[in-house]
Amino acid sequence: MQAHPANTLQVIGTIVGAGLQGHFHTWFSAQGQRYDQTIGMRTQSMLRKADGRLFALDENDNLREIKGLILQRQHTQDFIDDEKFPSQPQYDKFKGEQTLPDGRRTFAIVVQPPDGLPEEIDLDQKTFMIDRLSYDDADGTSTTDFYDYKVFGGSLVALREIDSNGDHDFDLTRVSEHILVDRQIPAVVFDLPKNNEVQTQAPVTVKLTDRAGHYFTTVNIHGHDYTFLVDTGAQGIVLDAHVAQQLGLHPEGRLEVSGATRVGGLGIAALDGLHVGSALLPLKSVSVLDLHNVMGAFQPDGVLGYPFFASAEVQIDAAHETMTFARPGALHAPGSPIAIDVDRQMIETQGKVNGVGGRFILDTGNSGELLLYGPFMSAHPNLLPAEMHPFANSFGVGGAAQALTAYVDELDLSSYRFFNRFSNVMLSKQGAFADRFDAGNIGMGVLRNLIMTYDVANAQAYAAQSSQFDDGRYRSRTENNESLTIPH
């Protein structure tokens, strides 16, 4: 979102990438800012209110207020857009001269205001316009390149932008075609939409099936029953390719998924909803992937991920193998509150490993106890004993990821302390296990000790001791721990 001198500004154009075509529309005014993007059948929006609050609406109409990592990134973007970085050089670091891949010569400056994440600006050596913005994003660096600047009624607009995460098969190119200056914008443009919710009048309880530490439930789609993994670590609803074919769904485009590695999927398909128990989860689209060999011998029909948890308050009692859910905020959950960050459409929270704090994904799709990611371990090289066990293989979308195994003396989650936790220390350089912001993920090997309630719509979780709670303080470290299966 860019600053501008006009009273109102609208930018309308086309967007192309990943085998899909679409359009975008941006509005700026004193009432707020909004960006809509439609590519193929997926529509996403970012909305900033006049009071500064920031919201995101995804392709399945799940609304979330941005309060965590993405808000920190937006603070830096605002600092750049408002042209504060030249006048406040104490937050700048000159990196030097460099040449971009397309030959443009730039001056590189790293900017980080007090409340923001670091971001690199490449200023063109001839025009001093911003040629590129770069920032750390998950397992790599994301960039936006700007071309063809023009002034419209005092507003400077780059007519072409290219977004990339380094995997150029999935680059998105935006071309601005219509620039509207000082046109009246209806107030309704900045109204908050309603969050999508499961359709049920009362709480619904369904059975969970435990298969080697993974928990599954039955999902009904158009009269067919399927077995879905319950996965708080998945950012979407996923159908296996054979299920999509059986239902007559036709995926479009190319889907990039971050699992054990980055991998391309079959695409996105339209689906109006699915039933979990007696409740309807309204949807617009699902991701279609080949889930064969993701979980060893057992192949799930699909994954029940973020859109389900964003549309309902969900309580998982692994000890009794039940899942109870209702509309957001309706369960009056027991236990200690846990603040969660859902900016990235995952459930992330603060925890500690051997006294060292970090962000962790609460990941019901991980059958193990704890994964620690390479970037976090590199930042804390003395966190675990120098001697670790030989390589283990962790399997997931994209294949196998190598890991070392070790025991963690203490893992802190909210007010709970767990001892002698078995961990895989991931060696991946790319994919979900190489995330630069999270320390790792906490799996069902730990979470099954708790009755966990996830109220994603209200950015809150709750943890209460289950009937089989064991903090592990008297646990033997000679127990047999086999390689873990981690689907993402």
Image: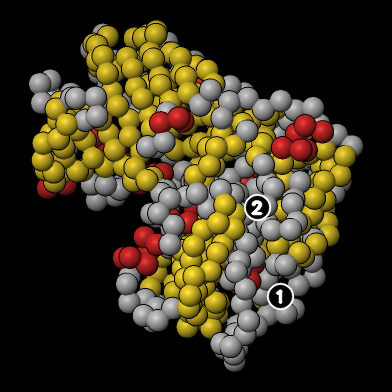
Residue at 34% over, 42% down: 141
Q: Which residue is mark 2?
A: 294
**Residue depicted at x 37% and y 37%:** 166
Residue found 12% across the figure and 20% down from its top: 127
- Say whether residue 435 is left or right of residue 465: left
Question: Mark 1 packing: few (<14 Cα in 10 Å), some, or many (20+)?
Answer: some
- Tag 2: residue type? Val
Q: Earlier in the sequence, mark 1 or mark 2?
A: 2
* Residue nearer the viewer, 36 or 272: 272
- 239 with respect to 97 (left or right): right
Q: Height in image: 484 above or below 277?
A: below
Asked if one can make out residue 312 in the rendered structure from this viewpoint, the answer is no
Res 154 → quadrant: top left
- Which of discs 1 and 2 lies nearer the camera? The answer is 2
Q: Position of residue 148 (x, y in %)?
A: 26, 14
Extreme right residue here?
Answer: 223
Q: Amino acid at mark 1?
A: Ser
Query: In what element is the residue under mark 2?
Result: loop
Q: Position of residue 308 (x, y in %)?
A: 68, 46
> Circle 1 is placed at which residue position?
466
- Figure disc tally: 2
